[in-house]
């Protein structure tokens, strides 16, 4: 055979291989739930390899595989169905817990802290917990279900909250929600925090509260956000933005209903504990208000290269050593960001989609600019981005851009913790990437919500 003939044969084989690859991709893209199930299985194998080898390399592979899988699903998102998505999500979450039980992975929070606080409440003493009464009740449920232990019971209790959050995002029923709900459901770089923290609880109530607002059920919205805020305060920020938007829109009755429902639920959950043990019941609020700027915050990322911040490399989540002016300046800049968001909510008065999208972005803005930051916050932030994107974006290309930014930000976050890259200070680079992507994504979504809201308002006036 001549060289030309061999070259022609190789070219033909390459064309045939490319054709088969495209055919497989097309076949898979018609079965998005199968793609999600296959990707979930591969991610589980990568997590198992990570825990058995101690190398974060396998989770880089997992992120790339998951990103490719979600791109395939994006192309076939019209075929996504809520029931099948929830089924895949349930089995992935339970299997993820199973992998960690197999390798005997534990976490101080869910194995020890939640156990101590939950059992103290069951024993008739209110604990000095750094979380509000709603969270303490959750820890007591964990301890009761686990017979005193909380590591496994807490992990399983989180599963229904994840399913509720996914269903609530889907419930907005815009043309962009199915794929965004799938990201919330199965993007694996948040999975560690699903299991070992309790951020899925306020996330579920935030999503439900905003869904109720979207359906004009303002009393229910306030009650759900109040319940979420009693567990972890972040849904209170969304409540405040919604209340301002309602007032600016001239809907005083709806605003009053919304506020009274929030205050009633939030107050009723606190009142018994305030009467019983006021010092301990308010400890959570004193604890965080007294904390200084931490090594995981955006402010450390900005100050450290200037030589104005340092932190113990083995405990970078603790308050950093910073000048006296750093904390007040961080608080002032955070307040400016929140005031800007409130002003935008006033500008889009009358447009529910824009107002609710901005309310979703309120907790994300607050957390990303807060002087105390923890990687588990991305659980709620991802859901907030999904809700805002479903309401504020127009096209699927914009939806894909949001998904890519969100996947990149959560991946960077996961390599700050739990897959920490201590080598050569790479965790700092991962933290910087998280905040660049996170702030840019939040700002872009706020701008899109504002511009679309104002455009719809002008059309309504001219019509």
Image (cartoon, rainbow, N blue to C red):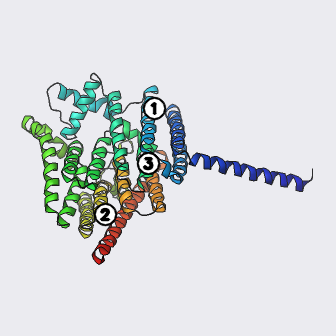
| Residue, far left | 275
Q: Which residue is mark 1?
A: 95
Q: Which residue is mark 2?
A: 354
Q: Residues within 10 Å of mark 2 (few under 14, many from 20)?
A: many
Asked if residue 18 lies left or right of residue 223, the reply is: right
Q: Nearer the viewer, residue 392 or 384?
A: 392
Q: Residues within 10 Å of mark 1 (few under 14, many from 20)?
A: some
Task: Kindly indicate the quadrant of the structure image that contains residue 106.
Answer: top left
Tell which circle, 2 or 3, labels the residue nearer the N-terminal end.
3
Q: Position of residue 430 (x, y in %)?
A: 45, 51
Marks 2/3: CA–CA distance: 22 Å
Q: Nearer the viewer, mark 2 or mark 3?
A: 2
| Residue, far bottom | 462
Q: Which residue is mark 3?
A: 183
Dot 3 lies on which element?
Answer: helix
Dot 2 lies on which element?
Answer: helix
Marks 2/1: CA–CA distance: 38 Å
Q: Nearer the viewer, residue 135 or 456?
A: 456
Q: Position of residue 41 (x, y in %)?
A: 52, 36
Asked if residue 184 lies left or right of residue 352, the reply is: right
Q: Position of residue 246 (x, y in %)?
A: 20, 62
């Amino acid at each position: 055979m001549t060289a030309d003939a061999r070259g022609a044969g190789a070219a033909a084989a390459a064309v045939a291989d490319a054709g088969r690859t495209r055919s497989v991709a097309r076949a898979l893209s018609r079965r998005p739930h199968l793609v999600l199930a296959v990707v979930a299985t591969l991610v589980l194998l990568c997590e198992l390899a990570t825990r058995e080898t101690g190398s974060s390399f396998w989770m880089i592979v997992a992120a790339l595989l998951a990103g490719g899988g979600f791109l395939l699903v994006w192309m076939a998102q019209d075929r996504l169905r809520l029931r099948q998505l929830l089924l895949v999500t349930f089995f992935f979450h339970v299997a993820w817990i199973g992998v960690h039980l197999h390798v005997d992975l534990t976490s101080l929070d869910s194995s020890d802290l939640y156990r101590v606080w939950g059992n103290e409440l069951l024993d008739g003493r209110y604990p000095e917990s750094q979380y509000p009464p709603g969270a303490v009740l959750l820890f007591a449920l964990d301890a009761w279900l686990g017979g005193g232990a909380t590591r496994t019971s807490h992990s399983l209790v989180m599963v229904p909250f994840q399913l509720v959050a996914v269903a609530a995002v889907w419930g907005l029923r815009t043309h962009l929600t199915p794929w965004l709900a799938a990201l919330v459901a199965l993007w694996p770089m948040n999975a560690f925090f699903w299991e070992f923290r309790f951020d899925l609880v306020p996330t579920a109530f935030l999503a439900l509260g905003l869904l109720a607002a979207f359906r004009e059920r303002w009393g229910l919205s306030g009650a759900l956000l109040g319940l979420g805020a009693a567990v972890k305060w972040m849904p209170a920020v969304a409540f405040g933005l919604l209340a301002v938007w309602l007032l600016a829109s001239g809907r005083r009755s709806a605003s009053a209903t919304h506020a009274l429902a929030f205050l009633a639920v939030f107050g009723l959950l606190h009142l018994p504990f305030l009467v019983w043990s006021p010092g301990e019941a308010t400890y959570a609020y004193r604890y965080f208000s007294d904390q200084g700027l931490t090594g995981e915050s955006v402010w450390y990322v900005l100050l450290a290269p200037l030589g104005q911040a340092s932190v113990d490399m083995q405990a970078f989540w603790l308050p950093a050593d910073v000048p006296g002016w750093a904390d007040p300046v961080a608080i002032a800049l955070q307040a400016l960001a929140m005031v800007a968001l409130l002003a935008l909510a006033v500008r889009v008065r009358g447009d529910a989609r824009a107002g609710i999208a901005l309310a979703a972005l309120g907790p994300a803005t607050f957390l990303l600019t807060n002087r105390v930051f923890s990687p588990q916050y991305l659980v709620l932030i991802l859901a907030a981005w999904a809700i805002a994107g479903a309401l504020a974006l127009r096209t699927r290309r914009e939806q894909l851009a949001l998904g890519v930014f969100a996947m990149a930000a959560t991946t960077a976050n996961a390599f700050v913790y739990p897959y920490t890259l201590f080598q050569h200070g790479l965790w700092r680079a991962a933290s910087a990437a998280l905040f660049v992507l996170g702030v840019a994504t939040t700002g872009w979504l706020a701008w899109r919500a504002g511009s679309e809201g104002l455009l719809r308002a002008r059309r309504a006036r001219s019509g």
